Amino acid sequence: MRILSGAALFLAMTFSAQAADPYAPPPPEVPDAVEARDIIFDLGFGAQLQPQFPSSQKYMTTPWPIAGLHFLRVPMIGDVVDGKPRVFSIYPAYDFTGERKESDAAYLAGTGKVDWSVELGPGVAFRKGPIRAFAEIRYGLSGHNGFVGEAGVDFIANQFARFEVRGGPRVSLATDDYMKTYFGVPVSAAVLDPYEPSGGFKDVGIEMQALYRITDKLSLRGKASWRHYVGDAADSPIVKAGNQDEFVVGIGLSYLFGLDLY
């Protein structure tokens, strides 16, 4: 029983990160059958088109894993996750950026390789009616050792039985280490002029997410976002040689599962 409880709590932390993450697709309504299950969760898969690296002119298709925890009951504790909207919530935030190689673009010659990065940190959200505001701060565990801050506001439209759409403005900022890693140019660069950016605002943009419930359990999901680099990031020779505006689009399917664990 303790093993099952521990596993359930681990799932709660893992899936909640993606369900509560403001960049994840909106979760479906949990059906009434939840009362008869110990855990209700979404699993799915899709594809997304995104820049090959930050500010890249080239785009590539990458997998889009979809997961969300909507209900979890733990023995002797009760309902850890109940699927109900909260006015105030705290959630684990994360982000992933792929590696950048000199061979990815001719103008990157001499700039060196940037390893893939994983960022983790806390996020907080406030929801009042159809408005949801959030802010989060993430630390780079690999690739860079800087901090990245993200904030935004979403308007949620879910008046329709099977369709929901949400979206709104975004803004992000980063510390010196992050900015130098992705936008700095060393003196060893063969094409670009040396450049050393400072921390500050990094980009502004808009994010949209949508969900259509094909059935009570099967959902079609989509997302689209636009980002525009600002500040020292926009002044970087890497961005000027690449792209100051970025777009990401994705589409996928998810299925709602219900299991009895105990």
Image (tube, rainbow, N blue to C red):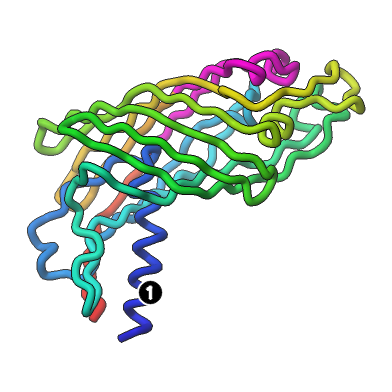
Report the span colored magenta.
Answer: 226-251
**Identity of the residue furthest to the bottom in this view:** 1
Residue pictured at 83% horizontal, 30% vertical: 111
Q: Is residue 131 left or right of residue 120?
A: left
Residue pictured at 76% horizontal, 26% vertical: 184
In this rendered view, identify the residue nearer to me: 78 or 228: 78
Q: Which residue is mark 1?
A: 7
In this rendered view, identify the residue nearer to me: 64 or 74: 74
Q: Secondary structure at mark 1?
A: helix
Q: Is residue 250 magenta?
A: yes
Q: Is residue 156 left or right of residue 233?
A: left
In this rendered view, identify the residue nearer to me: 206 or 195: 195
Quadrant position of the N terminus in the picture: bottom left
Where's residue 71, x and y in %? 22, 60
Q: From this view, report whether residue 96 is shown above or below residue 170.
A: below
Q: Is residue 17 left or right of residue 227?
A: left
Quadrant position of the C terminus in the picture: bottom left
